Amino acid sequence: MGFQYFCRGLRLISGKSLRHFVIVPLIINMVLFSGMIYLLFRQAGVWVDHLVSSLPAWLDFVRYPVWLLLLLVVIMVVFFTFTMLANLIASPFNGLLSEKVEEILTGRKADQPFAWRDLPALVGRSFRREFEKFGYFAPRALLLLGLSLLPVINLLAAPLWLLFSIWMMAVQYVDFPADNRNTGWSEMLAWLRRHRRDTLGFGGTVYLAMLVPGLNLVVIPAAAAGAPVFWLQGQAPDQS
């Protein structure tokens, strides 16, 4: 469960009524993902070699599998960092896209329709919410990064990073319809925990889609459009 929300988002953004809300997130995604790929090809191996060199001599027999695990961790860290940056820049437009999708799904117009003169206020509100996400993400990411640097224990880092990244993908995009409904941060997290299976399914689908060349270019708008489908069909607490 959960993958259908992303698939519905893909279908929605292909419609004429939403295409002009997708252009800016799409351009941001293309630019930042190009930079991420370049950085990974140029630096990932260097960083991993430095980390592996810190292993004690008695662990030489596991040096190669540890190298592979650390490479996976580095890729996930860089990948997720760039994803967070892309979402920060595109957040005002993703929030607006999410709002328009909800209008299509419910048939109800927003009480205050968006006008371009409202963009500065929308940017300020979106950035405040994104920094709230960063405050949630940063300490947990630093803990996982610390585990990645500890010999032997770092073997657990890759699966933990993967699970955390999947969770954060769902947090990132479901926050848009939640914020549009003026749902508080803590209440939104509690809602996601109550819908844990679909949350991980949705986040996992977004995460995997970002690894698929070509598809990863439209992941951000597709996920932003799929999140309100999840929010509404999951019977959000403030839906009435």
Image (tube, rainbow, N blue to C red):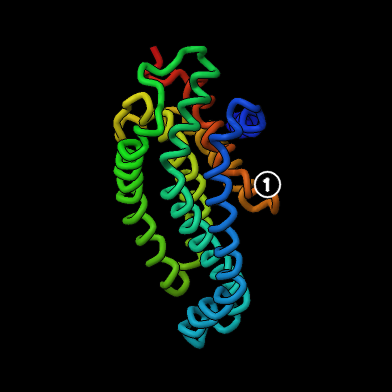
Q: Is residue 120 or residue 167 the one in the foreground? A: 120
Q: Position of residue 223 (x, y in %)?
A: 55, 37
Residue at the image point whose x is 55% and y is 32% from the top: 225
Which residue is found at the position 58% from the left and 46% from the top? 26
- Report the front residue among 44 and 72: 44
Q: Write down the residue under mark 1.
A: 215
Q: In the figure, 31 relative to 174: above or below?
A: below
The answer to which image quadrant residue 180 occupies is top left
The percent coordinates of residue 227 (x first, y second) are: 51, 31
**Compared with residue 215, is residue 77 higher up or lower down, i.e. above or below?**
below
Instruction: Please say whether residue 77 is visible from this viewpoint.
Output: yes
Q: Position of residue 10 (x, y in %)?
A: 64, 34
SS label for mark 1: helix
Q: Viewer-proximal residue, 78 or 99?
A: 99
Residue at 61% of width from left, 33% of height from top? 19
Q: Count how many numbered circles sit on residues in the image.
A: 1
Q: Residues within 10 Å of mark 1 (few under 14, many from 20)?
A: few
Q: What is the three-letter code of the residue carrying label 1?
A: Leu
Q: Quadrant of the N terminus?
A: top right
| Viewport quadrant of the C terminus | top left
Q: Nearer the viewer, residue 134 or 54?
A: 134
Residue 129 appears in which quarter of the rendering? top left
Which residue is at a point 35% across and 45% down the rendered structure image?
130
The residue sitting at the bottom extreme is 57
Q: Is residue 193 visible?
A: no
Outermost residue, front direction? 117
Dividing the picture into quarters, in which one does residue 151 lie?
Answer: bottom left
